Amino acid sequence: MKATPTPGVPLSEEQSYLKFAGTLLMILGAMQSFLSLAGISVVVFDSSIHFFGAIGIFDISELSTAGWVPRMLIGYILAQVFVGWAIGCLTMRAGYHCLHAKSWHFVYWVMMLNWFCFPAGTTVGLLLWRDLRRESVQELFEHS
């Protein structure tokens, strides 16, 4: 069974789900890429950004006096900003693969990678996780 529809034949439940999942992944990936690139431009053009009132984003001396929670949060935020565009591109590619029912393993691993992109990636990843593991959905994918 292929995910691409035949003209005049209604989509099965699994085909409709893959169309929904692929579209959702494409939207999420575009959002992640845009927000990451916007964040990078803000950081590049305004290095005086402060977290928690006093900790400068690039001021190592202030960061070393902060507690471990602020340091972890700053590290997480910087990772989301500077790596988010790549995760967004992978997510858009996974959406394309989902729409064309190719490479189930790639879609599954990118979906799991999105669990670390709180809050939108986590939400979408958990929504897709259950249904992508169904055998009827897996049968639609070409094993590559």
Image (cartoon, rainbow, N blue to C red):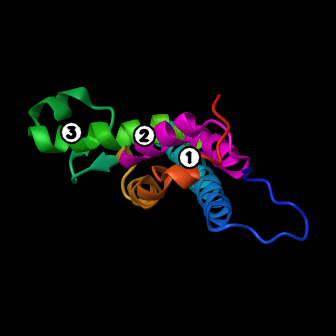
Residue at figure coordinates x 55%, y 35% from the top left: 106
In-front residue for pair 64/111: 111
The residue where tag 2 is placed is: 113
Q: Is residue 98 magenta?
A: yes
From the image, state whether disc 1 or disc 2 is nearer to you: 1
From the image, state whether disc 3 or disc 1 is nearer to you: 1
What SS does tag 3 mark? helix
Q: Is residue 109 magenta?
A: yes
Q: Dot 1, crowdedness within 10 Å: few (<14), some or many (≥20)? A: some
Q: Is residue 131 left or right of residue 67?
A: right
Q: Dot 3, crowdedness within 10 Å: few (<14), some or many (≥20)? A: few
Residue at figure coordinates x 27%, y 41% from the top left: 74
Whether residue 28 appears in this view of the structure is yes
x%, y% of residue 136?
Answer: 56, 54
From what the image shows, is residue 14 above or below residue 112?
Answer: below
The numbered disc on residue 72 is 3
The residue where tag 1 is placed is: 138
